[in-house]
Image (cartoon, rainbow, N blue to C red):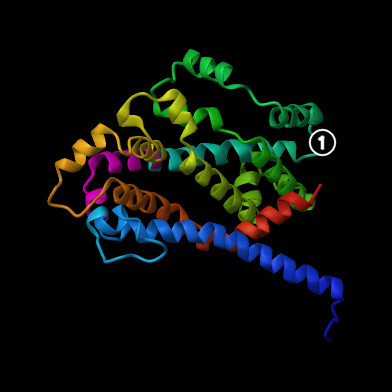
Amino acid sequence: MKIKTSFGEKCFDIANTAFLLLACLLVILPLMHVVAGSLSETNALIHSQVKLWPVGFNLDNYILVFKNTTFWRSFGVTLFVVVVGTMINMVLTVLTAYPLSKPYLKGRRPFMLYIIFTMIFQAPMIPTYLLVKALDMLNTIWALIIPGALSAFNLILCITFFRSLPEELFEAARVDGMSEYRIVWRITMPLSLPIVVTLLLFYAVAHWNNYYSALLYITDAKLRPLQMYLYMLLAQYDTSDARSFMSTITTWDVSPQGLQMATIIVATVPILLIYPFVQKHFIKGAMLGSLKE
């Protein structure tokens, strides 16, 4: 049976569609310009002839990026932080969320109030820096992982999802003699695939995009993550170092702007490729984790 929509609902759908199209264009058009610039000839970039499509076809920017050892070293640092950091995030989140999802846990309310408090009032930069320094983590890769090891928002999402699971399953498992750790691993985790995938994506993207921690805690160039490398690359644009670097590669059809655009694309593509594989679980996990109690 076809449901008739009112005039107001039609207007809302049209306005909603127009707004989403506008939002998509605001994201896609700058990205298309960067892709076009990275594939264009240098003269076209210098004379600002590149808009949304490449002018000429030039892969020298990408070839030079792939030959840059500094880029790959930063890429390796970021990959380590994403993989190891996300594993630590997930272990801490699941092991904290599971007991807090049980109504019979004594002292659960004070714990939850403390977690919510950290969401509202976050530690300022200087105390956080002094804490990391006191823990002797400055200029170590752990300074990029440990301070953000547990997200209060993601923890609440996970707690809410665990509460939606039927308690009878856990009671039956305890009657069969399973320990709480086995219940988490054998029962809770297989039933929580949507929220697990969602949190994996949240944590991985946060680690991938994080450059602020490196800006505060890392001065060793060998430990700079990819986003910090991009920040330094953009900050050095048009400096004497950049012009000196360009004078050493006269045989290549490249420019500082073209190299920046190619580096941005190479650094962005890996994290974009993750979304299509997790989209189904991502939507389900985020909705179930946010709509329950």
Mark 1 neighbour density, 10 Å: few (under 14) some (14–19) many (20 or more): few
Residue under label 1, please give it. 104
Residue 177 visible, this orientation = no
In this image, 206 relative to 158: left or right? left
Percent across and percent down for residue 4 are 86, 81
Q: Which residues are magenta?
A: 62-78
The quadrant in which residue 117 appears is top right
Front one among 276 and 50:
50
Percent across and percent down for residue 49 are 35, 60
The quadrant in which residue 191 appears is bottom right
Percent across and percent down for residue 166 are 77, 53
Front one among 129 and 9:
9
Front one among 46 and 222:
46
Does the magenta-highlighted stretch encompass residue 66? yes
In this image, 289 relative to 204: left or right? right
At label 1, the amino acid type is Tyr
In the depicted structure, whether residue 138 falls above or below residue 194: above
Which residue is rendered at x = 38% and y = 36% of the image? Answer: 225
